[in-house]
Image: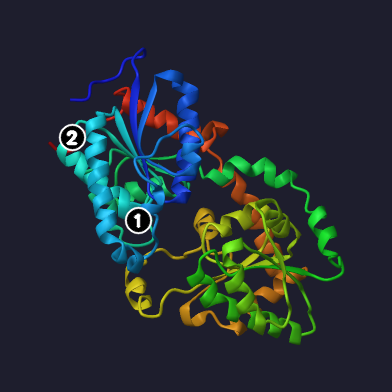
Amino acid sequence: MSETVSLRDEVRLVLIAGEHSGDALGGKLVSALKARLGDRLRLAGVGGEAMAAEGFVSDFPIEDVAVMGPLSILRHLPRILQRVYATVDRAIAFDPHAVVIIDSPEFTHPIAKRIRKHRPDIPIVDYVSPSVWAWRPGRAAKMRAYVDHVLALLPFEPAAHARLGGPPCTYVGHALSERLQWFRDLDPAPLADALHLDPARPVVVALPGSRASEVGRLIEPFGAALRLIEAQGVEPQVLMPCVPHMRPLIDAGLKSWPLQPHLVEGDDDKFRAFKLADAALAASGTVTLELALSGTPMVVAYRVDPVAAPFLRRLIKAPTVVLANLVLGENVFPEFHQETVTPENLARTLLPLLSDTDERRRQQAALKRIPGLLRTDGGRAPSEAAADVVLDYAFGKGRRGGPM
């Protein structure tokens, strides 16, 4: 049985991340734990490059389980199941004072359930809440059986878990909130100069997605919307952040565009593009929070596989899929889903954001509120707040264990 750790003992923790965004959170969490415990910290589990950079040794490459979407998971199911069972065995053998599962519920939650079954005395903390507020809300109450505490990235999630009967939940802050000063200080002028942008013409940043499926479904209507805007006498300069592995797909999709965008690469230039833009045309996702913290008005689109769409419509319970809207608690930023993602709808809502209009001023006022809503109590970094909760459980200060 795992004993309550004293202030002088080594602290054994198992951290389990299932994909690269979870690994990024895990890397910062490891750094915060090392700052508190130093040489007393012992770690095991699964992680990627960010965690490895902090000295974490993963049981296997995170790429073995970092697959997205139901079809991908089905194709790789035998390997994923093998990794689940191996991770459970390794975690139990390590006899940890606490286990931290990080995002990727399709991979990490089956592990947590099995650890709880075999070792109900080991506390389990879930870093990143599943989107129980958006779809399958019944998951929240079921999590109480195998999760002792949830660390939330979004400020409305603790109230959602309380309402849905989920585990205790603490808002520790979104990783983007650590970069608020950086967003403010970033100078967009170098990119404007490099691209020879005309200050007399409006700028649109186009963001059709970071995955091939998203780009394939959105790049054509985004281009057609810009064609409609151009037909009304407005010729915006278009910037499109692009990651290298998506370049061939984007190049192919841009052949039908009337206005060829400036493709920009790298994190710094992506955010410079956001700050230069009068407005954004964006796929739904974390990018809406990035745009919000950059102060960029936006129109948001969301398309999934047409076969899956009716099923998802029945499951989704949230009034919006735009994270920036959810943080605000009101639908300020226009969004279009599935068949409503038309060039006409996109152009109609984007065009007023390119000049001094009521629509633009309303969005600008809302954008000013978002940084404050994302701040944590005391202004601590998310990784520091997360480390405090994890160590509370490791030191036996939190409620330990599940149903015996």
Which residue occupies 36% across, 26% down? 392
- Please name the amino acid that badge 1 sits on: Val
Report helix, strand or loop for mark 2: loop
The front one of 143 and 84 is 84
In the rendered image, residue 369, in percent from the top left (x then y), is placed at: 62, 50
Sooner in the amino-acid sequence: mark 2 or mark 1: 2
Mark on residue 119?
2
Counting from the top left corner in percent of width and height, residue 19 is at 42, 51
Q: Quadrant of residue 9?
A: top left
Q: Residue at x 35, y 22 (%)?
A: 11
Q: Quadrant of the N terminus?
A: top left
Q: What residue is drawn where x is 41% and y is 63%?
A: 318
Tell me residue 403's x, y (percent): 15, 38
Q: Which residue is mark 1?
A: 132
Please identify the quadrant where the C terminus is shown. Answer: top left
Amino acid type, mark 2? Arg
Residue toward you, 344 or 8: 8
Decide if residue 65 is in sight here: no
Q: Is residue 79 above or below residue 302?
A: above
